[in-house]
Each structure stands twice: as C-alpha cells, then as structure tokens.
Image (cartoon, rainbow, N blue to C red):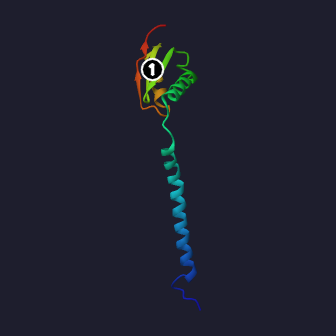
Amino acid sequence: MRNKSGPEPGLSKLGLFTRRLLIAALFTFILTPLLAEKDKPPVTDDVIVDQVRVKIADDSEIGGQPIQVDAHNGVVVLTGKVSSEKFKAKAEKVAKKVKGVTGVENKLVVGPF
C-alpha cells in the first residue's frame, strides 16, 4: 500500500531535474543574445553615414531636402538647408534612431533654397 502523505520516490527526483533543466534553458535563451551583442564589432562612421542618408532620403517629409551627413566617432553632423524648423527637427530625430549613433550635431539652417 502506498503512503498518501508524500510523492513516490522517483517523482521528486524527476521534478527537481525538470526544474533545473528549465532554469538552465531560460538562462541560455536570455544570456545568449546578450553575450552575442558584445562580440559584434562597433558600427563604423561610414556605415552610420550611409544609414542616416538612406533614412533621410526615404522619409516622405525630408527626403527632398539638401542635407549633408557626416559622422565622427558615432556623432552625426547634419549640415545644409531645410525649409522649416519642423524639417530640421525631423532630420535630427531620424538620425538619432540609426544604430550606432551616439549623438547628433544639428547644424542645419532654416531658409529658402
């Protein structure tokens, strides 16, 4: 006759093993992407400039504005003319969203072309 007060002897070991396996799997799924990020080389200024230019050109509001883009150690420098303060702010916002950008110097001038 089985004792009703406790689990069968084999089940408690199986439960502990399953819990440990689950915890190990969770740590693997959580830590692997975090550690992989550290192995990637930093984004170069050339890549940043290219990505900012593409994002600006693809934007429906500021795509036609004559905006020049440069970068130094991750800091993007925007120069040129835009037709409104709204477009100046939008260009800065677009540049800040690019991966690898650490800051934006917005030297855009608002005025007629």
Q: Residue furthest top?
A: 113
Which residue is found at the position 52% from the left and 52% from the top? 32
Which residue is found at the position 54% from the left and 28% from the top? 51
Which residue is found at the position 53% from the left and 29% from the top? 47
- The quarter in which the N terminus is drawn is bottom right
Q: Is mark 1 on a helix, strand or loop?
A: strand
State left or right for residue 111 relative to residue 59.
Answer: left
Q: Which amino acid does label 1 sit on?
A: Leu
The residue identified by callout 1 is 78
Q: How crowded is mark 1: few (under 14 residues within 10 Å), some or many (20 or more)?
A: many
Residue 5 versus residue 80 in the image, above or below: below
Expressed as whole percent of the image width and height from the top left, the position of residue 66 reads 51, 14
Expressed as whole percent of the image width and height from the top left, the position of residue 95 reads 48, 27
Q: Nearer the viewer, residue 107 or 73?
A: 73
Expressed as whole percent of the image width and height from the top left, the position of residue 16 reads 52, 73
Which residue is found at the position 56% from the left and 69% from the top? 18
Expressed as whole percent of the image width and height from the top left, the position of residue 45 reads 48, 28
Residue 96 versus residue 21 in the image, above or below: above
Count of residue discs: 1
Residue 78 versus residue 15 in the image, above or below: above
Q: Residue furthest right?
A: 1
